[in-house]
Image (cartoon, rainbow, N blue to C red):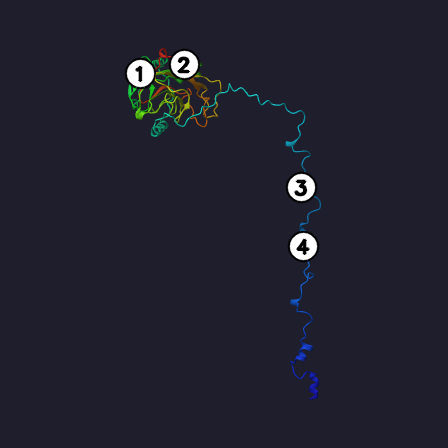
Amino acid sequence: MGFFKSLRGEHPDTVGSDTSRTSQTYAPPPGPPPSRQRKTDEHFAPPSGPPPGKNNHIPPPGPPPNNGDFLPPPGPPSSHAQPSGDPPPYHDWTVIEDTALLPPPPSLGHTTSPAGNASLSDADRAHEWCRTYPLIRPHQPAPAQYNSVTNGDISLVKPREYQGNMSRKSMGSWAGSTIPGGRDACLLSALPCYFPVMDSPLVTHTRKIIYFEVRIKSYGRSRDGDTSSLALGYCAVPYPTWRMPGWERGSLAVHGDDGRRYVNDTWGGKDFTGVIRAGDTVGLGMEFSASDTPPDYRNSLANTSNIKVDVFFTRNGVKESGWDLHEELDAENDLGVDGLDGQFDLYAAIGLFGSVDFEVNFNSQLWLWHPA
């Protein structure tokens, strides 16, 4: 027994006793457990220098390259350069150029007439009619026809819209009257007063004047109490005869109820003269002459015919006013002068509305106005 006891060595009598566990086999290390050790700055201090990734972007020494490659030129900018030499002479802005020789500005037009009485349906019908029937090209008159016009032996043609009487007083003189309540109607001369083939100043190398007069004997009342009216003008054909002259393409006229002039103007016309009253004898003429200004083909409203056209108006034998057919065009509001610039046959036109008693004279011997 002693032999076996010496092999086992000296062991406590009881295995697992408190004395053997704490003093030899399971004693913990000194200090707190590792997980509970106090963290200090020494354990987490960053390494010296920039992070490794920053070492690839260190700028080169010295200024940026741009400062040496794009140096501005010496001195101030050219816009701020100091003037050299004497300053320019002073411009006297109080001196205003003489504008007397410049053409007058375009007359202002109106969108409506204070005496307007035509219906919108009549206007729409006329616009469509004009689109359907273009202007007729000028033709060569027979010698007898041209002689009749030259001598003032011109007749008037009654359209179907005309309500009233008309008779020939003498050569080139006509008398007419319309009934109360008559609607708009346009009388046209049977022959043109102007033939481009015969009368154009580009052909004859001289000016050509056409003219006629109308005497208003009396005005009656129209339908619904409207004031009766008369207009005198010229137009190329065909023309819608239920419209007053000046309202549709290829026509111009002076209207007696508002004193305005209309040139291819279906709106309100332009201020021109006073109202034409009973007892007045009024006349309208057109003068065609060769233009000194070359045609301007870039401007759609400019004169491209190389013919200068002046329109004039007389009252009781005195030339009262007029206008240049081309110079007073407003590109924004005017519709041009198609058919009126000396390239088409032009007929005399007398527009009537309501009850009017009148006379028309194409014979120059009966005119109150006498050409110079």
Determine whether 78 is above or below 364 in the image.
below
Q: Amino acid at mark 4?
A: Pro
Mark yes or no: residue 318 visible.
Answer: yes
Q: Amino acid at mark 2?
A: Val
- Whether pointer 3 and pointer 2 mark residues with C-beta atoms closer than 8 Å, the reply is no
Depth check: 303 or 118 in front? 118
Please state the horizontal and vertical placement of residue 104, each as a whole percent of the image.
48, 21
- Of labels 2 and 1, earlier in sequence is 1
Q: CA distance from mark 4 to mark 2?
A: 107 Å
At mark 3, the secondary structure is helix
Q: Amino acid at mark 3?
A: Asn
Residue under label 1: 175
View extreme (front): residue: 225
Residue under label 2: 318
- Of labels 4 and 3, earlier in sequence is 4
Residue under label 3: 66
At mark 1, the secondary structure is strand
Residue under label 4: 52
Residue at coordinates 30% horizontally, 13% vertically from top-left? 169
- Whether pointer 1 and pointer 4 mark residues with C-beta atoms closer than 8 Å, the reply is no
Please state the horizontal and vertical placement of residue 199, each as a whole percent of the image.
41, 16
- Of labels 1 and 3, earlier in sequence is 3
Q: Please state which of the two labelled residues, at mark 2 or mark 1, is closer to the viewer.
A: 2
